[in-house]
Image (cartoon, rainbow, N blue to C red):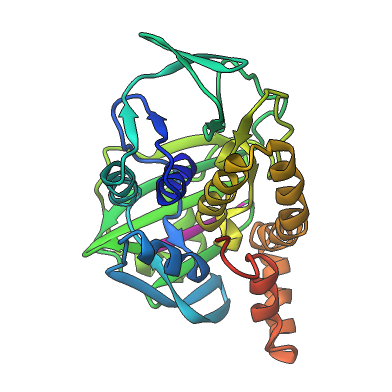
Amino acid sequence: MAGLSAACSLVDQGATPIILEPTPFPSHKVCGEFFSPECLPQLAKWGITFDHKIDNALFCSQNSSLRFSFSQPAGTMSHLAFDQKLLAYAQNKGAILIPEKVVAVRPNEVQTEKRVIPYSQLFIAAGRLPFFPSKSQPIYLGAKAYFSGLKLKAPLMMFSFSGCYVGITEVEKGVYNVALLSNQKELPTLDQLCAKDEGFRDVFEKGHMLFPSWMVAKIPPFGIRNTPPLPNTFFIGDALSAIPPASGAGLSLTLASGMMAADFALRKDPEGFKKEWKKRHSMRIKTAKLLHHCLLRPALFKTYCHTHHFFPTLNQKLFRLTREPFFYA
């Protein structure tokens, strides 16, 4: 998604990017598929609008709950549909898609399974690449599946459990994305979670999984990555940084990284991009980690709910601290 965001920004400025993506593309990814309000105006400029809008979210943990209202609506859409729309926009304005897997990256050239392609500016968006082994070991497990027949009390519901949290939203008519993040060695089963929370069980009472099984991914620590020193190269998306999904800012930051990198690439300034990204987002990621740890610990979440009664603007302040003050343009 970050690479396509960079491609859309580049074609808007008259460049002709080459997109290297292995088949099949697009494909499902473990993701909450939530698009934060600040990115929707830019997406509308690219012709992408949302049939499913989110004006509030309900956070729950056993006997505690908290409703958060968005000042501007957010959106939700399946990863497959969204990536197709981004790709179509970029290709319609001149971007070139080469459906080949990159097997090596060297200074000023990349090698696919079939050819060597020289580059003047390179964007790397994949978080895990065999030719750039990561020093960070995965410490979380993420899972995703689509369901039908769920009964939600809000357009977005978040459930806090000991050691994991779950987000649920409708991404297509009658189709619900259920995304889970856990800090345990093994993912809890749906039955185990239903046994712990009556409200969660009510959501899934008539639910039916549409995937043959859960998609599962290993997730490294959140933060800004240490990237290899390649000349004229911009690491973006998961290759650049990761923010906890508790913040709901992951896709927004992914899109922003591509747009911002495209702007710096036209100035041929990869170092300037890295410095500006760190300056803008280090504190946002740290704030998001507080929300993340709160949802992983129901006792902390319950304390937060009580605190919110005395400080009702706390939610909005934390929300703003994890967003761009304006979506990068």
Q: Nearer the viewer, residue 248 or 61?
A: 248
Magenta residues?
Answer: 164-169
Position of residue 104 measured from the top left corner of the image (x, y, whole percent)? 53, 13
In the image: residue 37, left or right of residue 18: right
Residue drawn at the location 51% of the way across and 22% of the way down: 119
Residue drawn at the location 74% of the way across and 38% of the way down: 271
Position of residue 173 measured from the top left corner of the image (x, y, whole percent)? 21, 65
Total marks placed = 0
In the image: residue 186, left or right of residue 287: left
Q: Nearer the viewer, residue 212 or 175?
A: 175
Residue drawn at the location 24% of the way across and 48% of the way down: 210
Residue drawn at the location 63% of the way across and 66% of the way down: 323
Quarter that holds the C terminus: bottom right
Q: Nearer the viewer, residue 293 or 15?
A: 15
Q: Is residue 300 magenta?
A: no
Above or below residue 118? Residue 145 is below
| Chief secondary structure of the magenta portion | strand
Quarter that holds the N terminus: top left
Above or below residue 26? Residue 89 is below
Q: Quadrant of residue 141?
A: top right
Above or below residue 313? Residue 110 is above
Q: Quadrant of residue 127?
A: top right
Q: Nearer the viewer, residue 324 or 290?
A: 324
Position of residue 290 measured from the top left corner of the image (x, y, whole percent)? 74, 61
Position of residue 276 measured from the top left corner of the image (x, y, whole percent)? 73, 50
In the image: residue 69, left or right of residue 285: left
Q: Quadrant of residue 212?
A: top left
